[in-house]
Amino acid sequence: MAESETANQQAPKIEDSVVKLRAIVVGLKQDLAHLQQQLDTLDSKPELLCSLEILREDAESRADSLEKEVKQLREELKAIRELLGLNLKKK
C-alpha cells in the first residue's frame, strides 16, 4: 500500500511540473519570436547597426577618459596627503 500512496503523491507533482514546463516553453517561444523580430529589424536597417557601433565606440572612449581621470585624481590625492603628512596606510 505504501507504494501506491507514494505514486499518488508523486502524480500531482509530475503534473504540476509538466504544466510549469509547458509555460516555460511558451515563454521561450515568445522570446525567440521577439528576438527574431529584433534581428529582422536590425538586418533591414543597417543604419541602426552603424549607430549602435558609433554609440559603443563613444561609450568606450568616455569610459577610458573617466578611468584616466580617476587615476589622475588618485595620484593628486596621494600627493596632497604626502604634502600634508597624512598616513597613507589603509585602515
Image: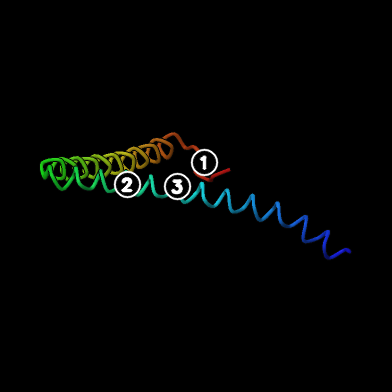
Q: Nearer the viewer, mark 1 or mark 3?
A: 3
Q: Amino acid at mark 1?
A: Asn
User: Does residue 40 sit above or below 84 in this rendering?
Assistant: below
The residues bearing labels 2 and 1 have C-alpha atoms spaced at a distance of: 60 Å
The residues bearing labels 1 and 3 have C-alpha atoms spaced at a distance of: 61 Å
Q: Secondary structure at mark 1?
A: loop
Question: In x, y percent, where is residue 13?
Answer: 69, 53
Question: In x, y percent, where is residue 87?
Answer: 52, 41
Q: 6 or 85, which is in the foreground? A: 6
User: Does residue 8 sit above or below 40 in this rendering?
Assistant: below
Q: Secondary structure at mark 2?
A: helix
Q: Nearer the viewer, mark 2 or mark 1?
A: 2
Q: Amino acid at mark 3?
A: Val
> Which quarter of the figure has residue 73?
top left
Q: Amino acid at mark 2?
A: Ala
- Name which of mark 2 and mark 1 comes first in the sequence: 2
- Check residue 25 in the rendering and tell me which mark sits there, or answer none: none
> Which quarter of the figure has residue 6?
bottom right
The residues bearing labels 3 and 2 have C-alpha atoms spaced at a distance of: 11 Å
In this rendering, position of residue 57 left or right of residue 67: left
Q: Secondary structure at mark 3?
A: helix
Name the residue located 39 percent from the left edge and 37 percent from the top edge.
77
Name the residue located 24 percent from the left edge and 40 percent from the top edge.
59
Quadrant the N terminus occupies: bottom right
Name the residue located 70 percent from the left edge and 51 percent from the top edge.
12
Quadrant the C terminus occupies: top right
